[in-house]
Image (tube, helix red, strand yellow):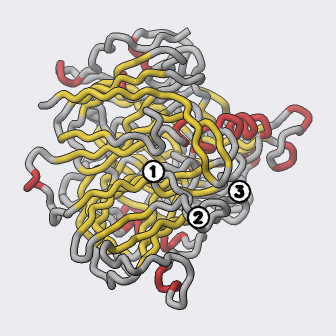
Amino acid sequence: MALRHYTFTVKEVPYTKLCSTKKILTVNGQFPGPILKAYKGDTIYVNVRNRASENITMHWHGVEQPRNPWSDGPEYITQCPIRPGSDFTYKVIFSIEDTTVWWHAHSSWTRATVHGLIFIYPRLPKALPFPKSDHEVPLVLGEWWKQDVREVVEEFIRSGAAPNESDALTINGHPGFLYPCSKSDTYELAVEKGKTYRIRMVNAAMNIILFFAIAKHNVTVVSADGHYTKPFSAAYITISPGQTLDVLLHADQNPKRTYYMAARAYQSNLDIGFNNSTTIAVLRYISSNNDTKTSTSSSSSKRYPKLPPYNDTSAAFKFFSSIRSLYSGLVPARITRKIFTTVSINLLPCPNNSCEGPNGSRLASSMSNISFVTPSHVDILKAYYYHIRGVYGTRFPDFPPLVFNYTAEDQPLFLLTPRLATEVKMLEYGESVEMVIQGTSLVVNGLDHPMHLHGFSFYVVGAGLGNFNESEDPSTYNLDDPPYRNTATVPRSGWITIRFVANNPGVWFMHCHFDRHQTWGMNVVLIVKNGRGIDQQILPPPPGLPPCY
Ligand code: C2O
Ligand code: CU
């Protein structure tokens, strides 16, 4: 097992996009940030040095961190922040993951610019279950505000309304030539005819699920969220914030042409404003060099990929449900713990009805109608490990299925106002957990929610629209080769069912990976207790944990 050491210096650096310059938070001055590379089984150490003016923590999204919640990163969940001028060394253990995951900051909205890919290689290259590619291509989809992201967050928290829309979507940090003042800021991928390119991609956008496609080129999907899939060919992909994919691009088209790739929002609900712009990148065949014109020409329409309409829920979920695990027969079968939870947008009263949400209220969000309040002085992990009382409660409620019609328009009023609390869900070591996550249409007629669980990957055994029906829907579950992921999207006013074995003791955050919903409280913490065995217990805290004040 190799040990690798990385240094991440977090600092502010000026960047210019869309003709406007601002200072952004970066790792080592790079946006998107550096790529971490590791072999399966490696332990890597990342020394994070905070040389910026705001707090930071780092999360290794999709890395399961066996028994080691101390290095998981969510602020005030598993650690107190690294303050300006301080350092902390994360120990990142790559247990079972292959392929591609990513890292990002996990304090307020700092992840908007502080993120990067993680490439994991199998120990034996021959072990790869798909044809070897000739080249690897990192592809980070993101979102850019001209405004300082700190201001965006402050404003939206103060107003109680939705945050300002971003000004552009980006591909590897470049908005592309469709945006004003962005002609030369277009990512270009040069390929050679006949070769195969492995695109390792992440949706690092803050609040937007994306469709992505490449003109005239289907891609072959070979992994999702760090786990191999049965390879399948796709004309477009759907990728939610937090998700990663490995796709193979076969450069097999007319090399005299230049093709475009594009990403645009999938947004099921028209009731709220959203960024419906398109980010474009260029796919150019090398040695077709006499083709220098990338601007409009008579055949240019063929060069634009076809993306599904922005509100096409069935297209979005058709992609998600075509994902199958490469391996069969690994889904936990005998469930010992069933959890039923809802994810909702809610309303909170506001003094003098002075907020900018509906009727002067403030928008909020919740799970099981509890709007999660993040502790502000000590993290939940420390409170749990050292038995510090008064930081969190242990009564996160289950909703029994269908006492309400969660997806009808008229809802019991009390559901509109969530309870503000820090409630965790306790799990015994080794329990086989099934969790049904029901989306509601309490306030905005329902939205999709990309739900992410730290510390685990889980099987997405089922998904559907409308209210979960306990007597019928389980018969539709795929218990053979369902997607094995760490972030799964609950469809608008629909549900998903996930399964996993609680064999990773620790304190694990679960939340919507739309940052606006996370900020509003669509979160819960799962605490998995220690097992009896010595290797079933949380590791001791590492030296140098950032202090809490
Ligand atoms: Cu990718 Cu809690 O995050
Ligand atoms: Cu959400």
Decide which of tag 2 and tag 3 comes sooner along the chain.
2
Residue 346 rendering spot, x and y as whole percentages: 70, 45
In the displayed structure, would residue 5 be above or below residue 63?
above
In-front residue for pair 451/205: 205
Residue 299 rendering spot, x and y as whole percentages: 50, 89
In the displayed structure, would residue 339 be above or below residue 82?
below
Residue type of the residue flagged with mark 1: Val
**Badge 2 vs badge 3, beta-carbon distance below 8 Å:** no
Residue furthest right in the image: 352
Q: CA distance from mark 2 to mark 1?
A: 46 Å
Residue 237 rendering spot, x and y as whole percentages: 42, 67
| Residue occupied by mark 1 | 436
Total label count?
A: 3
Question: Is 143 left, or right, of 134 in this rendering?
Answer: right
Q: Quadrant of the C terminus?
A: top right
Decide which of tag 2 and tag 1 comes sooner along the chain.
2
Q: Quadrant of the N terminus?
A: top left
In-front residue for pair 310/423: 310
Residue drawn at the location 16% of the way across and 62% of the way down = 132
Question: Is 322 left, or right, of 85 in this rendering?
Answer: left
In the displayed structure, would residue 485 be above or below residue 354?
below
Front disc: 2 or 1: 2
Is residue 398 visible in the rendered image? The answer is no
Instruction: Specify the label residue 183 is tagged with.
Output: 2
Residue drawn at the location 44% of the way across and 23% of the way down = 78
Is residue 351 visible in the rendered image? The answer is yes
Label 3: how many Cα within 10 Å (few below 14, some 14–19, many 20+): some
**In the rendered image, which quarter is residue 38 located in?**
top left
Residue type of the residue flagged with mark 3: Val
Residue 101 rendering spot, x and y as whole percentages: 33, 46
Q: CA distance from mark 3 to mark 1?
A: 21 Å
